[in-house]
Image (cartoon, helix red, strand yellow):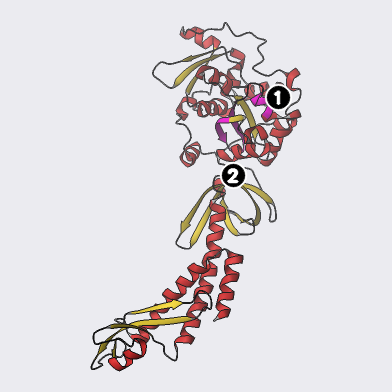
Amino acid sequence: MSEIIDALDQLEKEKGISKEVLMEAIEKSLDSACEKDFGKDTDYEVKMDRTTGKIQVFANKTVVDVIYDTHREMTLEEAKHYDPEAKLDDEIRVEVTTKDFGRIAAQKARSIIVQAIKEGERSAVFDYFASREKDIITGIVQKVNDRGLTISLDEKMETILSEQEMIPGEHYRTGDRIKLYIVEVKKNPKGFKVVVSRTHPDLVKRLFEREISEVADGTVEIKSISREAGSRTKIAVYSNDKNVDAVGACVGMSGTRVNNIVDDLKGEKIDIIEWSEDPAVFIEHALSPSKVISVRLLDGEKSAKVVVPDYQLSLAIGKEGQNARLAAKLTGYKIDIKSESQAKELGEEYYDDNYNDDYDREYDDEKYDDDYDNEKYDDDYDRDGYDDEEYDEDYDREDYDDEEYSDEEYDDYDDEEYDDYEDENSGSDDKE
């Protein structure tokens, strides 16, 4: 049986499957063989020698005058061969075998080893992907169909990227490499399943951690993210070191850092916002690229009234309400935006002490030059068909009332006015 020990040693070395665990499994599997030969009521024990691999079966027999069951009883004369001091009614432990037991043991051992190899490999693959949960993995597209993509993950297994988890407008071909976010690794009756996504907000977070060393080491902290996959993402960052500019670190020299992330997201726009513990200041930053005259927080409510210059209203709301919607998700506040003229007509109080027409948000062109490649940000992506409700359900973002920014409410503000402004000021939102 030494070949079994050699096989078990090799499995332990190559597959990481414990030899002791395998031996215990072999011993347990031989119980059924013993039941067939010796009967279910027999008091027996199967032992496998840890050095030689030899398998033995021991049974406890009672010393009697007359034998009625050879599997459980033995005469005093037989008992004397095992224990010279044996007497009637003693329990004697003896080795028992049958002519077929060696063959049966070998078959059982082989079956256990093959099964252990399969289970060990599955367990190793599961542990590998479980350790990558909530992280990014690179896959290779194996098949493209109407329901999504079949993707090979590190040549260890295949998974499906469903159409709902794909960024709208993305197209892939067989053999393309694709970065995915592992949402969950869950077991099922057939093994386990790796759930992946390209639309999850944390995909952007992980990309920032990979690309920007200050984020990876904790110097710059990502406070919150709001995302409409394929169109635009707002990300709020904060520096734990007063000598490090959080936004500048994320943008990088000539925009190289953030542009690498944009490339991974197939051109999705990214607004990098400076986080503030003051909700009013944070809301003001979140509405970038629009200038803000005043932010008034409502007592007892997680909502705010914002006043912007008349010519900035369409920009603050954004195309189809996107800028306001993302700002609300980013800050966790419901935001009611009005132009300066509207605020005056309604008699609402606001303060413009800190506002002037030359206000340049937080970062001027001289400081950051051409941090972003403007060509990447000239055209707005049209998010037709995007389901906000599905997005909120999938990823449990901050509660947000879409009715606040419904298309009906903002019908008076022509998207063309927003587009014209953004074309004239291309890049202003990207430096934020």
As drawn, the label of residue 246 is none
* 432 to 164, vertically: above or below: above
Q: Residue at x 75, y 31 (%)?
A: 375
Where does the image place residue 120, in percent across and percent down from the top left? 53, 65
Q: Is 31 on the left-hand or right-hand side of 317?
A: left
Q: Position of residue 2 (x, y in %)?
A: 56, 80
- Give coordinates of residue 18: x percent, y percent: 52, 65
- Mark 1: few, some, or many residues within 10 Å (few <14, many ≥20)? some
Residue 237 in the magenta stretch? The answer is: yes
Q: Quadrant of residue 383?
A: top right
Q: Position of residue 392 (x, y in %)?
A: 48, 37
Image quarter of residue 211: top right
What is the magenta range?
A: 222-249
Can you identify the residue that label 1 sits on? 426
Mark 2 lies on a secondary structure that is: loop
The amino acid marked with disc number 1 is: Ser
Is 342 in the magenta?
no
The residue lying toward the viewer, choosing from 151 and 45, is 45
Q: Which residue is mark 2?
A: 198
- In this view, 36 is above or below 259: below
